[in-house]
Amino acid sequence: MGRWGPDARGPLEQAALELCLQRGFEQVTVSEIAQRAGFSERTFYRHFADKPEVLFMGMGYLQANVVGLVANAPTAAVPMEAVIAAFEQAGAVFQENAEVLRRRQGVVDTHPELRARELSKVAALAEAIAEALRRRGAADPEAVLVAEAGTLAFRLAYAGWIRHTGQHDWPRLFRRTLEEIGGVIAGAVTHMAPGET
């Protein structure tokens, strides 16, 4: 998620994105990414397990940020309140990096391997949130349900936000998406035939 610092990771991420946009993900090699960034291939592998991972450092930052915010939410906050607040606050980085995120998503969306990697990252995020909720005292299935609902709202809201980068207020969009999910579930339960519950 584009916060390129003084170490090699930032320049490598930037180089990878530039090359993938110019030539396509499959045509770019790790050696070329490292060379463009001014580092060795060995340096690349000190920071990233493989080529796809260089496009997903932002997910690591997001997970650490969201999980940290959930863990440190006020004691009185119920699980859903903690998760909503965490995603709303973490989303502030989106606006700071809107153009980079839009371009990166364009690369991810055109490659099945990258889309699959993204889904696995989102699943890991949900599990990490659930574990943070358990540490706060939430029991299953509540911890899992809240984490999954929050993560699903994040996925859907982010997809809408990225299509209209800079035109949506992230916290409002996230909360509206979560409300829509709740409405769909409530409607489905209401229309269930007797004995289906």
Image (cartoon, rainbow, N blue to C red):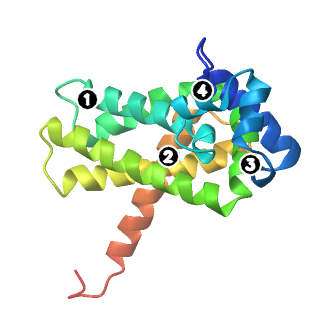
Residue behind mark 4: 43
Mark 3–mark 1 Cα distance, whole angstroms, equals 33 Å
Res. 107 mark: 3
Please name whichever residue, 180 or 11, is drawn nearer the observer in this view of the structure.
11
Label 2 sits on a secondary structure element that is: helix
Inspect the image, locate mark 3, and give the three-letter code of the amino acid beneath it: Val
Foreground tag (2 vs 4): 4
Q: Is 35 located above or below residue 150 in the figure?
A: above
Q: Find residue 180 and report its horizontal and vertical position in percent.
A: 48, 56
Seen in the picture, residue 1 relative to 160 is either above or below; the reply is: above
Q: Amino acid at mark 2?
A: Phe
Instruction: Give SS at disc 3.
Output: helix
Q: Residue at x 75, y 48 (%)?
A: 106
Q: Residue at x 17, y 28 (%)?
A: 76
- According to the picture, the residue beneath numbered tag 2 turns out to be 154
Marks 2 and 4, Cα distance to the nearest angstrom? 33 Å
**Disc nearer the start of the sequence (4/3):** 4
Looking at the rendered image, the disc whose residue lies closer to the viewer, 1 or 2, is 1
Q: Residues within 10 Å of mark 1 (few under 14, many from 20)?
A: many
Q: Nearer the viewer, mark 2 or mark 3?
A: 3
Q: Position of residue 55 (x, y in %)?
A: 63, 40
Q: Which residue is mark 1?
A: 71
